Image (cartoon, rainbow, N blue to C red):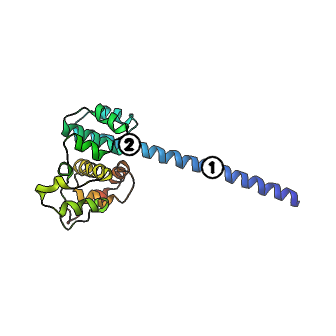
Amino acid sequence: MTLMRMEDVVGNIRRVMGALLVLASGATAAAAQEGATAQEAYFGAVAEFFQLPRSEVGILGDWRLDVDEIPVVLFVARRAGISTEALVALRQSGRPWTDLVVRYGLDASHFHVPLPDQAQAGVLAEAFRRYRSLPANRWSEVALSDADIVALVNVRVLAQTLGLTPEAVLREARGGAWHEIYGRLIRDPQARVPTEMDR
């Protein structure tokens, strides 16, 4: 009798473990699908911002380039008057954004987004400390990191396409990739509502 009960217990454990594995794999697939959906929505926002066909942005997504750098490629290429292909090739060769923007005649003044002096800049706090330490006519002297450049371009794209202020976008940017932040903003209507302070 005890042996039968032990076999029943083992059988039940196996069934429970099998069910947990099915649930876990389903959750992983759902998360992957959600990530793909957020990325597609982000590509749509980037296409809207740059007034390009979504397919053109999708092609850039196939070029072994970090998803969050796609708007940077388009922004720099457009401002510098160079082809996206040339810029992607240089970036893929290991050149940092800081070198590439200088090479093509851009500086920190081209990347600045408006943010009230009292506003919290979140992930861009150090960059805005530098901007705020100089008058606007000297913003070209501000030293930006690659991460600052990527963040500034993405804040600009997300703010414009979602109808938010840069401050509202930065409040939501507590970490993670920019395309994931965009996904959170489009899923959460409360996050998209500008507060009185943002208006």
Residue to which mark 2 is pinned = 66
In the rendered structure, the answer to whether residue 165 lies left or right of residue 40 reads left
Horizontal side of 4 relative to 177 (left or right) equals right
Residue pointed to by mark 1: 21
Residue at the (28%, 62%) spot, across then down: 126
Q: On the rendered image, what quadrant is the N terminus found in? A: bottom right
Position of the C terminus by quadrant: bottom left
Amino acid bearing label 2: Asp
Q: Residues within 10 Å of mark 1 (few under 14, many from 20)?
A: few
Q: Residue at x 23, y 44 (%)?
A: 102
Give the quadrant of residue 73: top left
- Disc 2 from disc 1: Cα separation: 31 Å
Residue 190 visible here: no
Task: Name the residue at 13% across, 56% down.
Answer: 138
Q: Position of residue 110 (x, y in %)?
A: 18, 48
144 lies above or below 72:
below
Task: Report the front residue among 6 and 115.
Answer: 115
